[in-house]
Structures are given as structure tokens and as C-alpha cells.
Image: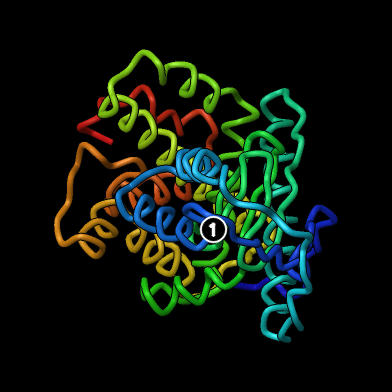
């Protein structure tokens, strides 16, 4: 991916030096919460759900003042530069897309952290992976996730990393357009399985929006190099519910899917990349079996 000459975003909040080490008291503790978060993620739970459970369980945990997080490596700083460029590019694309639809785009902030972080959605561990919090309109990422993406999920490459960021910004788009609120409003009236299906639609739409960003970024700035789209598709495949559940427990439970299968995630990213049209990303009007 061609990124080094790109504009850097002014909306990156760097908390990597804060550390945020917790002090333990009796109870589950944040170490246990990290295990809970990991198991819930492997079972297909959404980041918002994980945060809610962690906040509920954290009543017996006392937080200390942030501690020094140690020196930041040159490699980590280069990743931070990369993230800033990708974020800036999403700002440019979505500003244009919203303007074409008669809207004004309000860009989010992206928070870099190490180990753990406090958001408006609660306390989060790096084990959760990147997430978006609608409460403060911020996306959060521990850059160490990219090591996991490569080592565990076998999805290396800078454009695979860009896809992850673009997906989280996709959730911000849903927040701005009201899709997230509409889904949340139905939660109390649906069974767990029915709500999971809505969550899948939400996640696949965020994948579509990630593809839409890539479409416009390529058309305007020719950012892609050979193999870049394949990198994104590999990443989408690696974090499908069926793949994660198979790896985590050895079998899959489709009714517990909340993000979509590998094939679905690839299909909607590709559709967004090929279309580039905001209105064609309506995953809520498609019969579930055809997603």
C-alpha cells in the first residue's frame, strides 16, 4: 500500500505511554477479565457486549493512576504513522461521500493504547482487539493486534492493517447514520439468536464500508499495490465467526454468530470495493440466508 506520502490525521490520540496498570482487590480482577474478553470474542460476541460484561464484572477492581508504559519501539512508531495516514484517508473519503449525499461528515478520533484503555463504553483490554465506542465516537487499537493478525491469523500486510481500521470507521459511519441506534433499540424485543442476526448485518455493513473506502481511496489517490486487496480479503477471512469458533473450540454454532462468516465478510468487503456507492451497502434489506 502506498502510504508514506499521505496526509497525517490530527485526530489520533496517543495513550501508549499511559500503560493503565490496574491494582487488584478480591474478585475477578482485570487479568480474569482479559480471559473473559478473549473467550467471549472467540464465541462471536461483539466488542460492545464484551465491554458491557467487563464493566459489570469490574466492580471489585480498583484502578490506579496510569503508569509509565515504557519506551515505544521504532516499529511501533512507524505503525502509528501508518494508522494516522489511513485515518486521514478515511476522513477524506467519507467527507466526500457524505457531501455527495447532502450530509456533513463528523470524523472520529482514533486512540492508540497499550495493554488496556478506558473508554466511554468501559474499561477494555487489548485481548478484545480493535473496537469502536459510540459513546465517545472513538476507535481504539493496541498496535500489538497487528502482530496477532500476522502470527495467529496469518493475515500479514499493510493493507490488511488498513482494512481493520476502515472497518472500525465503518462502525462510526453506522453511528452517524443511525444504524447502530436502530439495532440497539430492538435488543430488548428480540431473542438472543434474533439479535445476533442483526449484529451480523451490522458487522457486514461495516465491512462493506471498509471496501467502499478502498474504492474511493484508490480512485482518488491510487494507494493500492499488487496483492493489497488479497491482503484485506485474507484478513476478512481470518476473522470470520466460523473460522474463529473453529479455531477456539473446534466446532461452530451458527446461531451465536455476531460478525458473519469468513465468506460473508469477504463478499461484503468486495462488494463495497467494486461498488463504491453508499446506498448499496444496506445489509438490513437482504434476506439473511443471502447475506
Outermost residue, left side: 251
Residue drawn at 45 percent across, 71 percent down: 149
62 or 226, which lies in front? 62
Residue drawn at 34 percent across, 26 percent down: 195
Q: x, y percentage for residue 276?
A: 53, 42
Q: Quadrant of residue 140?
A: bottom right
Q: x, y percentage for residue 130?
A: 55, 56
Residue drawn at 28 percent across, 42 percent down: 257
Horizontal side of 136 relative to 224 (left or right) equals: right
269 or 84, which lies in front? 84
Q: Secondary structure at mark 1?
A: helix
Outermost residue, top side: 189
Q: x, y percentage for residue 264?
A: 30, 46
Quadrant location, the N terminus: bottom right
Horizontal side of 146 relative to 251 (left or right) equals: right
Outermost residue, bottom side: 74
Q: Is residue 275 visible?
A: no
Q: x, y percentage for residue 163?
A: 52, 59
Query: Is 86 situated above or below 103?
Result: below
Query: Is 289 situated above or below 64?
Result: above
Residue carrying label 1: 30
Amino acid at each position: 500500500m502506498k502510504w508514506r506520502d499521505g496526509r497525517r490525521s490530527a485526530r489520533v490520540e496517543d495513550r501508549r505511554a499511559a500503560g493503565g496498570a490496574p491494582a487488584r482487590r478480591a474478585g475477578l480482577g482485570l487479568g480474569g477479565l482479559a480471559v473473559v474478553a478473549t473467550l467471549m470474542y472467540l464465541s462471536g460476541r461483539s466488542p460492545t457486549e464484551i465491554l458491557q460484561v467487563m464493566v459489570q464484572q469490574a466492580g471489585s477492581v480498583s484502578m490506579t493512576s496510569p503508569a509509565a508504559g515504557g519506551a515505544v519501539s521504532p516499529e511501533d512508531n512507524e505503525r502509528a504513522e501508518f494508522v494516522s495516514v489511513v485515518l486521514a484517508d478515511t476522513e477524506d473519503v467519507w467527507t466526500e461521500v457524505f457531501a455527495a449525499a447532502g450530509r456533513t461528515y463528523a470524523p472520529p478520533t482514533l486512540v492508540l493504547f497499550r495493554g488496556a484503555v478506558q473508554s466511554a463504553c468501559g474499561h477494555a483490554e487489548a485481548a478484545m482487539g480493535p473496537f469502536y465506542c459510540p459513546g465517545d465516537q472513538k476507535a481504539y487499537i493496541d498496535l500489538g493486534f497487528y502482530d496477532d493478525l500476522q502470527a495467529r491469523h496469518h493475515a500479514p500486510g499493510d493493507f490488511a492493517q488498513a482494512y481493520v481500521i476502515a472497518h472500525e470507521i465503518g462502525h462510526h459511519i453506522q453511528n452517524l447514520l443511525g444504524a447502530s441506534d436502530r439495532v440497539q433499540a430492538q435488543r430488548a424485543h428480540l431473542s438472543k439468536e434474533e439479535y445476533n442476526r442483526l449484529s451480523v448485518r451490522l458487522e457486514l455493513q461495516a465491512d462493506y464500508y471498509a471496501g467502499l473506502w478502498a474504492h474511493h481511496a484508490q480512485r482518488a489517490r491510487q494507494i493500492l499495490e499488487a496483492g493489497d486487496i488479497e491482503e484485506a480479503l485474507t484478513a476478512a477471512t481470518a476473522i470470520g465467526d466460523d473460522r474463529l469458533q473453529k479455531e477456539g473450540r473446534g466446532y461452530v454454532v451458527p446461531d451465536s454468530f455476531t460478525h458473519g462468516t469468513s465468506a460473508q465478510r469477504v463478499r461484503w468487503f468486495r462488494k463495497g470495493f467494486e461498488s463504491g456507492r453508499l446506498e448499496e451497502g444496506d445489509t438490513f434489506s437482504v434476506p439473511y440466508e443471502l447475506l
